[in-house]
């Protein structure tokens, strides 16, 4: 019996096989591609991006204090206080006060590096530089006019040399009713030297505190000084 062939059967079978293999290959490639994506994402480390600290003052708040990061140091102030814009003068100073009208409250001022050595005060506070921080040695003195002998001079004299706990400072006898506290140390009049944590740089500081209340609260000044740390 003779075998009968259909003319178009073999070409069509080959075409179907080619299409089937092409689908299988594409499916395998699709599986490999998405498997590679899954594996890459699984092995990729989790990266957290943090913004660098700005050069300008950085302020951190909590319920009781504000922390200020200045270029060379950080310090805590009462949360209700505000920073005062820096005046354009030869001194680099930083000022915080408890109210818009300074004569109604308290004020802390910090001079850095260029120190007003002729700044006379009414009360003295002896401090000690301990590398990157400052510590208080004793307490604020009484009004210096009560234990410092007056000297000859006109009303415009800068101040009278005085001592508190053996440390030199300038007593402001021309304004005895004020209540300005100034710091001095063995480093010099109106001066204490601190060292940077991140470099070999040293900086000179002079701290003042003014309180216009009838019963000044020096604890605010002590706490601020205790919080200061060099950068």
Image: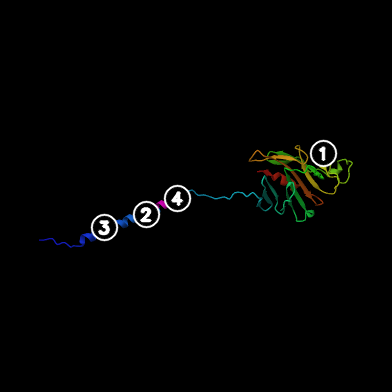
Q: Is residue 18 above or below residue 205?
A: below
What secondary structure characterizes most of the magenta part? helix
The kind of secondary structure element at disc 2 is helix
Residues 92 and 150: in front is 92
Q: Which mark is residue 17?
A: 3
Whole-Å distance between the Cαs marked 2 and 4? 16 Å
Q: Determine which residue is flagged by label 2.
A: 31
Q: Determine which residue is flagged by label 1.
A: 163
- Which segment is the magenta one? 35-43
Is label 1 in contact with label 2 (beta carbons under 8 Å)?
no
Label 3 Cα neighbours within 10 Å, binned few <14 / some 14-19 / many ≥20: few
Q: Determine which residue is flagged by label 4.
A: 42
Q: Where is the N terminus found, in terms of image quarters?
A: bottom left
Label 2 Cα neighbours within 10 Å, binned few <14 / some 14-19 / many ≥20: few
Q: Is residue 65 above or below residue 164?
A: below
Is label 2 in contact with label 3 (beta carbons under 8 Å)?
no
Label 1 Cα neighbours within 10 Å, binned few <14 / some 14-19 / many ≥20: some
Place of residue 47 in the rendered image (x, y in percent of width and height, measured from the top left): 52, 49
Q: Residue at x 20, y 61 (%)?
A: 9
């Amino acid at each position: 019996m003779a075998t009968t062939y259909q003319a178009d059967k073999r070409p069509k079978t080959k075409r179907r096989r080619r299409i089937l293999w092409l689908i299988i290959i594409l499916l395998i490639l699709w599986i490999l591609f998405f498997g590679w994506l899954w594996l890459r994402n699984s092995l990729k480390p989790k990266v957290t991006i943090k913004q660098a600290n700005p050069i300008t003052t950085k302020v951190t708040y909590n319920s009781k204090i504000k922390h200020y990061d200045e270029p060379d140091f950080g310090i805590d102030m009462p949360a209700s206080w505000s920073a005062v814009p820096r005046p354009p003068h030869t001194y680099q100073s930083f000022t915080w006060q408890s109210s818009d009208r300074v004569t109604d409250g308290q004020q802390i001022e910090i001079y850095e590096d260029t120190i007003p050595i002729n700044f006379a005060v009414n009360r003295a506070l002896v401090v000690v530089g301990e590398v990157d921080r400052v510590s208080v040695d004793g307490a604020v003195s009484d009004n210096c006019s009560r234990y410092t002998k007056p000297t000859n001079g006109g009303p415009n004299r800068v101040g009278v040399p005085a001592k508190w706990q053996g440390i030199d400072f300038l007593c402001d006898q021309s304004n005895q009713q004020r209540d300005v506290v100034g710091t001095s140390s063995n480093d010099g009049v109106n001066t204490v030297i601190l060292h940077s944590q991140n470099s070999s740089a040293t900086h000179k500081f002079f701290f003042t505190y003014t309180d216009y209340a009838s019963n000044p609260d020096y604890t605010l000044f002590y706490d601020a000084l205790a919080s200061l740390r060099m950068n």
